[in-house]
Amino acid sequence: MNSELFEHQGRDMLLAACTVLCIVLGVVWTVRASDEKLVKADDPVQRTDAVMITEISVGGMKVDAGLFLKPDLVQPVAPFPADREWLDKMTIVLINRTNKTIVRAGVTMQFLDTGDCVAQPCDATLLQLGNTPLGANDGREGQPTAPRRPKRADLDWKPGQRLALRVHDFIDQISASISNRMSLSAVNRVAIHLGAFYFADGMVWSVTGFSIPDPIRAGKFTRLPSDYFPGRVGQNWPPGYSQ
């Protein structure tokens, strides 16, 4: 009888231990799953792109975000482990591929936890450096762009140079822009897209191509041919390579 009792107690203890182990493993899996982050920067690229993203890192660790790295090699888009302050530690490195100086740069960050940005709308924030050059026109309004108040620090991004955009410098702006939907610590997935980039002479580039202020139609821009590129089109294509 005692042996049966001990056997029964042994089974109960083993079952209890297994239950505790399963709970612990479940908690660990949940924590690891919730700590996985994702960055996408996999927009199609063209040889005539003025600006390209060369690297995205979080806390000094490079992440796979779908970047065009070298001929015949595109990064995968892969999740990675990070803490809740990961956005504050993100750096986006870009290169100016042209032979012109860029004075204003814009990068859009979309928050995929609020929607897929395709079938569903999503929250987004425009991160900007520099200022619109004097005399540049606003293509939507047809009027000269008014100086920004307060003015941002000037940007003098030379040809061939890399520019490190630190998300930390925009973290308050980002927090305010998504505050109605979620907190910063709840952000797990973002997409990065290139915006508009202004050159010192008033020319502007976006993923749709280059445009210049129209000398005849005041306040308007004229789209340049789709194959236009200011500089040698094979230079830094992709970044670090020449063709």
Image: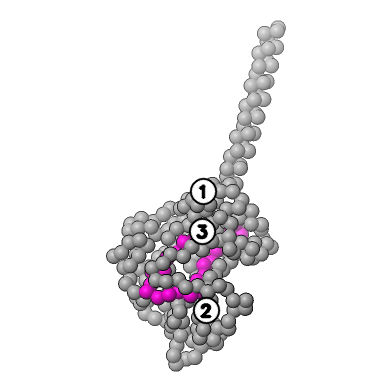
Residue that carries the numbered disc 2 in the rendered image: 132
Q: Position of residue 107 (x, y in %)?
A: 52, 67
**Could you tell whether 228 is left or right of 122 in the image?**
left
Residue sitting at the far bottom: 216
Query: Is residue 28 part of the magenta span, yes or no?
Result: no
Quadrant of the snapshot with the C terminus: bottom left
Magenta-highlighted residues = 92-114
Residue that carries the numbered disc 3 in the rendered image: 91
Residue at x 66%, y 16% (from the top left corner): 10
Mark 3 in CB contact with mark 1 (< 8 angstroms): no
3 or 2: tag closer to the N-terminus: 3
Count of residue discs: 3
Residue at x 36%, y 55% (from the top left corner): 73
Q: Where is residue 202 in the image (x, y as percent from the top left)?
A: 46, 82
**Which colouring convention does the figure follow?**
one colour
Q: Residues within 10 Å of mark 2 (few under 14, many from 20)?
A: many
Residue that carries the numbered disc 1 in the rendered image: 80
Give how far apart the Cα atoms at labels 3 and 2 are: 23 Å
